[in-house]
Image: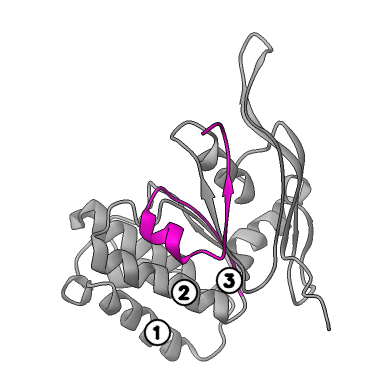
Amino acid sequence: MSVIAPVLTLDRVQVGYRHPDGGTRVLVESLDLTLAPGDVVGLWGRSGTGKSSLIRHLAGLSRPLSGRIIYRSPDGSLAGEVADLSAGDLARYRRVHLGYVDQSCELIGELSALDNAGVWIHGGRLAGSVPEAQQTVRGQLERLGLGHRLGAPASRLSGGEAQRVALVRALSKRPHLIVADEPTGHLDGSAAREAIALLREHAAAGAAVLVASHDPLVHAAVDRAIRVGED
């Protein structure tokens, strides 16, 4: 029986903050974790326990206090410690390999919901043609209840609508690794269940998924859960 190699490996990762006076506040003491293609893993913990900081580390937006975060793409095209990737490789990691969803969404205000969701299509890793990818994005937005808002500029979207657009944008490039910070935090039950279904479908297609969330619906849908911080 063959063993599937991990896409992401966390080796004794310490999460926290450095104070201006030189001291540190440690939120996560030492975290070991592996994610393989097909895994859906939940990250749990009270507010302030370092979940969002860890998600930012995985996206290469900040560095952990110590430890290593190692990415290896299944196709062998990119491998290395995220914090030590060259500027070019880090840009390629974010553009092609990583589907990143944070709580701020950061949509382009003057673009429509549909154009925001498909912004990565031309630079991403497509399984089919651009028209097919655009149709997939449209279908995912419709599944999430945004069929009537496809042409609305992002500046006119509610928080929950923006969150759904940001999720579809992250998935549109068919990334190897998906990391999401509270992706259902502003969604009602129906939209949340569809968002979770989309994440699980991408995992079934070969992505590794890590979700930081307080949502019981997410908790019930993951394959395993990792708790950070004190209970």
Q: Is residue 130 magenta?
A: no
Q: Position of residue 218 (x, y in %)?
A: 42, 60
Cα–Cα gap, marks 3 and 1? 14 Å
Q: Tell me the tag on residue 181.
A: none
Residue 21's place in the image compared with 82, above or below, is above
**Which part of the image, by quadrant, shows the N terminus?**
bottom right
From which residue to which does the magenta span run? Answer: 207-231
The x and y percentages for residue 230 are: 55, 31
Tell me the element at label 1.
helix
Residue at the disc numbered 3: 175
Q: What percent of the width, then of the height, locates residue 140?
A: 35, 78
**Which one is in front, 98 or 114?**
98
Image position of 56 (left or right of 194)? right
Mark 1, other Cα within 10 Å: few <14 / some 14–19 / many ≥20: some
Q: Specify the amino acid type for callout 1.
A: Thr
CA gap, disc 2 to disc 3?
8 Å
Identity, as a three-letter code, of the amino acid under mark 3: Pro
Q: Which residue is mark 1?
A: 136
Q: Is residue 219 magenta?
A: yes
Assign a secondary structure to mark 2. loop
- Say which amino acid is labelled 2: Ser
Q: Along the horizontal axis of the image, is 160 left or right of 102? A: left
Q: Would you say the residues marked 2 and 1 are in contact, meaning their CB atoms lie under 8 Å apart?
A: yes
Closest to the observer: 95 or 35?
Answer: 35
Disc nearer the start of the sequence (3/1): 1
